[in-house]
Image (cartoon, helix red, strand yellow):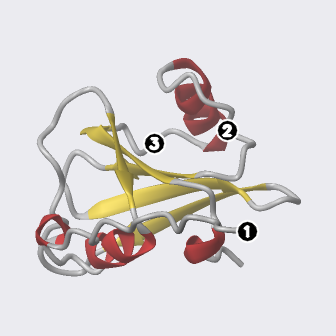
Amino acid sequence: MIRLGSVPRILLWSAPIDFRKGVNGFVALVADALATDPYCGDVFVFRSKRSDRLKLLVWDGTGLVLATKWLESGRIVWPPVRQGVVRLSAGQYALLADGLDWTRVVPPPVRKPVWLG
Protein backbone atom coordinates (compact mmCIF):
# COMPACT_ATOMS: atom_id res chain seq x y z
CA MET A 1 0.00 0.00 0.00
CA ILE A 2 1.25 3.49 -0.86
CA ARG A 3 0.78 6.02 1.94
CA LEU A 4 1.42 9.37 0.29
CA GLY A 5 1.62 11.25 3.58
CA SER A 6 4.63 9.18 4.61
CA VAL A 7 6.76 9.39 1.45
CA PRO A 8 9.78 11.71 1.33
CA ARG A 9 8.63 13.66 -1.76
CA ILE A 10 5.95 13.66 -4.46
CA LEU A 11 7.50 14.84 -7.71
CA LEU A 12 5.41 15.70 -10.78
CA TRP A 13 7.08 15.58 -14.20
CA SER A 14 5.23 18.37 -16.05
CA ALA A 15 5.82 17.33 -19.68
CA PRO A 16 3.51 14.71 -21.25
CA ILE A 17 4.91 11.15 -21.41
CA ASP A 18 4.18 8.27 -23.77
CA PHE A 19 2.12 5.97 -21.54
CA ARG A 20 3.01 2.88 -23.57
CA LYS A 21 6.21 2.77 -21.50
CA GLY A 22 6.46 0.01 -18.95
CA VAL A 23 8.04 0.11 -15.53
CA ASN A 24 11.57 -0.07 -16.99
CA GLY A 25 10.87 2.92 -19.25
CA PHE A 26 9.70 5.01 -16.30
CA VAL A 27 12.68 3.91 -14.18
CA ALA A 28 15.01 5.01 -17.01
CA LEU A 29 13.21 8.37 -17.25
CA VAL A 30 13.59 9.00 -13.52
CA ALA A 31 17.25 7.97 -13.54
CA ASP A 32 18.26 9.81 -16.74
CA ALA A 33 16.01 12.86 -17.15
CA LEU A 34 15.44 13.59 -13.47
CA ALA A 35 18.88 12.40 -12.32
CA THR A 36 17.20 10.83 -9.30
CA ASP A 37 17.37 7.37 -7.76
CA PRO A 38 14.07 5.65 -8.64
CA TYR A 39 14.48 3.41 -5.57
CA CYS A 40 14.67 6.29 -3.05
CA GLY A 41 11.02 6.01 -1.96
CA ASP A 42 9.85 9.25 -3.60
CA VAL A 43 6.61 9.13 -5.61
CA PHE A 44 7.06 10.14 -9.24
CA VAL A 45 3.91 11.34 -11.03
CA PHE A 46 3.67 11.47 -14.83
CA ARG A 47 1.00 12.92 -17.13
CA SER A 48 -0.46 11.58 -20.34
CA LYS A 49 -0.71 13.57 -23.56
CA ARG A 50 -4.52 13.59 -23.28
CA SER A 51 -4.43 15.03 -19.71
CA ASP A 52 -7.05 12.58 -18.47
CA ARG A 53 -4.71 10.10 -16.79
CA LEU A 54 -1.59 9.90 -14.69
CA LYS A 55 0.90 7.26 -13.67
CA LEU A 56 2.74 6.87 -10.37
CA LEU A 57 6.08 5.18 -9.94
CA VAL A 58 7.26 4.43 -6.42
CA TRP A 59 9.55 1.97 -4.64
CA ASP A 60 7.54 0.69 -1.66
CA GLY A 61 10.44 -1.09 0.05
CA THR A 62 9.79 -4.49 -1.52
CA GLY A 63 9.38 -3.64 -5.21
CA LEU A 64 8.47 -1.01 -7.75
CA VAL A 65 4.83 0.01 -8.08
CA LEU A 66 3.55 1.49 -11.35
CA ALA A 67 -0.07 2.60 -10.98
CA THR A 68 -2.42 4.34 -13.43
CA LYS A 69 -5.25 6.77 -12.60
CA TRP A 70 -7.76 7.36 -15.41
CA LEU A 71 -10.51 9.99 -15.10
CA GLU A 72 -13.79 8.83 -16.64
CA SER A 73 -14.73 12.42 -17.48
CA GLY A 74 -12.97 15.75 -17.37
CA ARG A 75 -9.30 16.56 -17.38
CA ILE A 76 -6.58 16.70 -14.76
CA VAL A 77 -5.32 20.21 -13.97
CA TRP A 78 -1.61 20.26 -14.77
CA PRO A 79 1.06 22.92 -14.37
CA PRO A 80 2.28 24.61 -17.58
CA VAL A 81 4.06 22.14 -19.87
CA ARG A 82 7.82 22.47 -19.56
CA GLN A 83 10.69 20.12 -18.99
CA GLY A 84 10.98 19.98 -15.27
CA VAL A 85 9.66 18.79 -11.95
CA VAL A 86 7.06 20.28 -9.61
CA ARG A 87 7.07 19.17 -5.98
CA LEU A 88 3.60 18.46 -4.56
CA SER A 89 2.28 18.01 -1.05
CA ALA A 90 0.12 14.96 -0.34
CA GLY A 91 -2.94 17.24 -0.27
CA GLN A 92 -2.10 18.80 -3.63
CA TYR A 93 -1.60 15.34 -5.14
CA ALA A 94 -4.99 14.19 -3.79
CA LEU A 95 -6.69 17.15 -5.48
CA LEU A 96 -4.78 16.57 -8.73
CA ALA A 97 -5.75 12.88 -8.81
CA ASP A 98 -9.42 13.81 -8.29
CA GLY A 99 -9.33 16.23 -11.23
CA LEU A 100 -9.63 19.33 -9.03
CA ASP A 101 -7.62 22.53 -9.45
CA TRP A 102 -4.79 21.84 -7.01
CA THR A 103 -2.92 25.03 -8.03
CA ARG A 104 -5.34 27.10 -5.94
CA VAL A 105 -4.37 25.28 -2.77
CA VAL A 106 -1.13 26.56 -1.30
CA PRO A 107 -0.02 25.08 2.02
CA PRO A 108 0.74 27.75 4.61
CA PRO A 109 4.39 28.29 5.51
CA VAL A 110 5.42 26.49 8.67
CA ARG A 111 8.04 27.98 10.94
CA LYS A 112 10.48 25.48 12.34
CA PRO A 113 10.32 25.51 16.14
CA VAL A 114 13.41 26.71 17.98
CA TRP A 115 14.81 24.40 20.64
CA LEU A 116 15.55 26.37 23.81
CA GLY A 117 16.99 23.48 25.81
Q: How many angstroms separate mark 3 from mark 2 (CA)?
A: 19 Å
The number of callouts visible is 3
- In x, y percent, where is residue 59? 73, 53
Q: Which residue is mark 2?
A: 38
The kind of secondary structure element at disc 2 is: loop
Q: How many angstroms separate mark 1 from mark 2 (CA)?
A: 39 Å
The kind of secondary structure element at disc 1 is: loop
Image vertical order of residue 11 relative to residue 97, above or below: above
Q: Which residue is mark 1?
A: 117
- In x, y percent, where is residue 11? 45, 48
- Label 1 amino acid? Gly
Q: How many angstroms separate mark 1 from mark 3 (CA)?
A: 55 Å
Q: Nearer the viewer, residue 72 or 102?
A: 102
Q: Which residue is mark 3?
A: 20
Image quadrant in which the C terminus is located:
bottom right
Residue sitting farthest toward the front? 117
Looking at the image, is mark 1 or mark 2 earlier in the sequence? 2
- In x, y percent, where is residue 111? 40, 65
- Label 3 amino acid? Arg
Q: Nearer the viewer, residue 76 or 79?
A: 79
Q: Nearer the viewer, residue 45 or 89?
A: 89
